Image: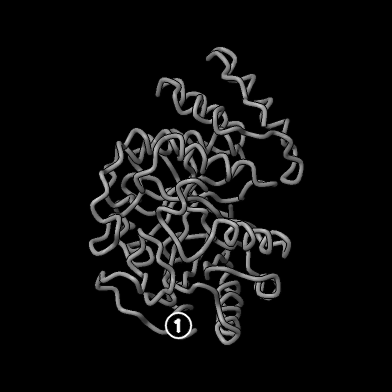
Amino acid sequence: MKPIAIVPRDAMRAEAAQVRSASPSRTDQSQRWSVEAIENVYALPLMDLLFRAQTVHRQNFNANEVQLSTLLSIKTGGCAEDCGYCPQSAHFETGVEATKLMPLEDVLAAAEAAKAQGATRFCMGAAWRSPKPRDMERVTAMVRAVKTLGLETCVTLGMLDGEQAQALKSAGLDYYNHNLDTAPEFYGRIISTRTYRDRLDTLAHVREAGIHICCGGIIGLGESRHERAGLIAQLANLDPYPESVPINHLVAVEGTPLAHTEPLDPFEFVRTIAVARITMPRTMVRLSAGRETMDDAVQALCFLAGANSIFYGDKLLTTANPQSQRDRALFDRLGVRAQAGSA
């Protein structure tokens, strides 16, 4: 892959316009990013990097709007996978108890509450390696019910085959979340029960079914900047790249193998948001897990770097999330408004 040259600051606005015109549609994506080129972007002085990211962001989005998504765990714990960061894995003692799939009426009530709080997308997550046929029937019913509320729908259920992806599409699913987590060369240090190819195959089934892709990763697993750049390269070079890219900050949960991982420099997280925005100009870059540990200044820098979506509500799957009132207060202080329509 040919590296992308780093341009001087006075040419950044022209470059941002070129990036936009080089990708006139989601299916015409000729630009490829090498890991080396992405590392060069990471290494820019922070002010130059933020300027470049904000320029690209303004070419494609309203800079003062943030899309709100709410995430509900519809089936918690007992997962057969050994993802080293996850408190829901059956391999670790984290205090998370396995539950059965939630009743439809409880899911619908949670979706109604999310909509009342301003969310435009409702995401449902189940701790499975992959869903069974009886699970698919119940989940597709949930998707249909949530769609009747006028919300965008997203699910994350683990690995899918082509038939399962088509069933979700027929139910009206808008987005499927399936993260790559990290770079291919670091992946084996985090997970052993599912391969990188398994993840890419699921994404291919989802794309072939005509469902939008929500796919990102986790920062702060102990990876190097080179490996962070490798994750971004994997995402940016998907053809087309994902419509939504959640950037998670590791939540170090006691009992998991990564519980005592050295904390990441907050500026490195901000840099990752900026690099995601530059390499994927039209995606929704979402601040996801880990916001509970970020102060308002770091979150503001993330919005400046091009983040334009958050998970909104008091809890993600099993970990805490900033309360809705705190988010609204921060938006007011920044002059940011919640996006009224869909992403």
Residue at the spot x=57%, y=39% of the render?
233
Closer to us: 334 or 255: 255
Residue at the spot x=32%, y=58% of the render?
321
Residue at the spot x=61%, y=50% of the render?
243
Left-right relation of 140 to 307 = right
- Quarter of the figure with residue 265: top left
- Quarter of the figure with residue 214: bottom right
At which x and y percent is residue 210?
Answer: 72, 62
**Residue that badge 1 annotates:** 101
Kind of residue at disc 1: Leu
Closer to us: 185 or 86: 185
Residue at the spot x=64%, y=58% of the render?
212
Question: Number of callouts in the render?
Answer: 1
At which x and y percent is residue 278?
Answer: 55, 33
How many residues crowd mark 1 within 10 Å: few (<14), some (14–19), many (20+)? Answer: some
Q: Work out which quarter of the rendered image holds the N terminus and state it.
A: top right
Q: Secondary structure at mark 1?
A: loop
